[in-house]
Each structure stands twice: as C-alpha cells, then as structure tokens.
Amino acid sequence: MTDAAPCHLLVVDDDPSVLQLFAEIFTDAGYRVTTMPAAPSTAEVARLTPDLVVMDHRLHGESGWLAIRRLAADPTTAAIPAILCTADYGAVNRLLNEPSMTGVTPVRKPFDLDDLLTAVATALTSCPEGDDDARHGA
C-alpha cells in the first residue's frame, strides 16, 4: 500500500454480523472503515466524507436504494460513489434499468470476496486503492 491515507468506506447494514464481516474484509484490504446500522442522514455522510458508501438494500426503515438516491440528490454527497448490496436479485434487475442507477454498483449476496473487492476498487477513483497484497490473497 502507498503512504497516502487509505480510502474511507462507509458501510451500512442493519445486521451486526454483516457489518463486522465487511469491516474485517475492508480493513484487511487496507481501507479505513466506518460502519452504521441504519441509513445515515445526508449531513452524517457529508461530515464523515467517505470515498465510497457500501449499503445494504433491505434496511429497517429507509431502504438502501432510497438512501443512495437521497445522497445522490444532495450536492454535498452527490459525488460519492455507492455500492448496493442485496440478496434480492429481482430488486437488482429492476434497479439496473433505472436511469438514476448511474454511479451505483450492485453487488449480489452471497458475494464472492474477489468480486466484492474488485467492485470496491473499481468504484474508487479519487483515492489510493487498498492493499494490493490483501486484495489478491497474498
């Protein structure tokens, strides 16, 4: 990994075990991780300044998709790319056909670790990538 500060990922999921899993995966890959158990407000995301939001689709309360659309509509958070994780393949297929899906990468659960890390690295364009050795299993 380079000497530059690691990319900051905001991970949102209402399942504590999934939050812990994502935190471990992304930390091991060299990213800085903040976790939240519910869809954050736009002000919270703007304050945290993540380089990428990784959000579950089926959250209690506001869905991940609606939260991502809300963040995309606000000028303070619109430039932050997002990954939407879900086991609901039908939702992913519907969302892929929406024009507002631009800039959002879907990741289907259960996910392949390499596919997840590739999706994260691809979505990140403005900061150094995570640890190449960790990402490639070295």
Image (spheres, rainbow, N blue to C red):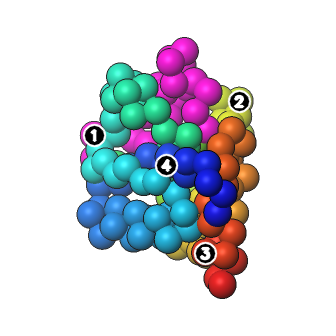
Whole-Å distance between the Cαs marked 4 and 3? Answer: 16 Å
Residue behind mark 1 = 61
Q: Position of residue 85 (x, y in %)?
A: 52, 56
Q: Position of residue 130 (x, y in %)?
A: 62, 60
Residue behind mark 2 = 99
Q: Dividing the picture into quarters, in which one does residue 100 lie?
A: top right
Q: Residue at x 51, y 24 (%)?
A: 77
Q: Position of residue 62 (x, y in %)?
A: 34, 37
Q: Earlier in the sequence, mark 2 or mark 1?
A: 1
Three-letter amino acid code at the position of disc 3: Ala
Q: Secondary structure at mark 1?
A: loop
Magenta part of the chain: 60-81
Q: Position of residue 58 (x, y in %)?
A: 39, 51
Question: How would you rate the neighbour count of disc 1 (Cα within 10 Å): few for under 14, some for 14-19, many for 20 or more?
Answer: few
Q: Earlier in the sequence, mark 4 or mark 3?
A: 4
In the image, residue 36 above or below residue 107 = above
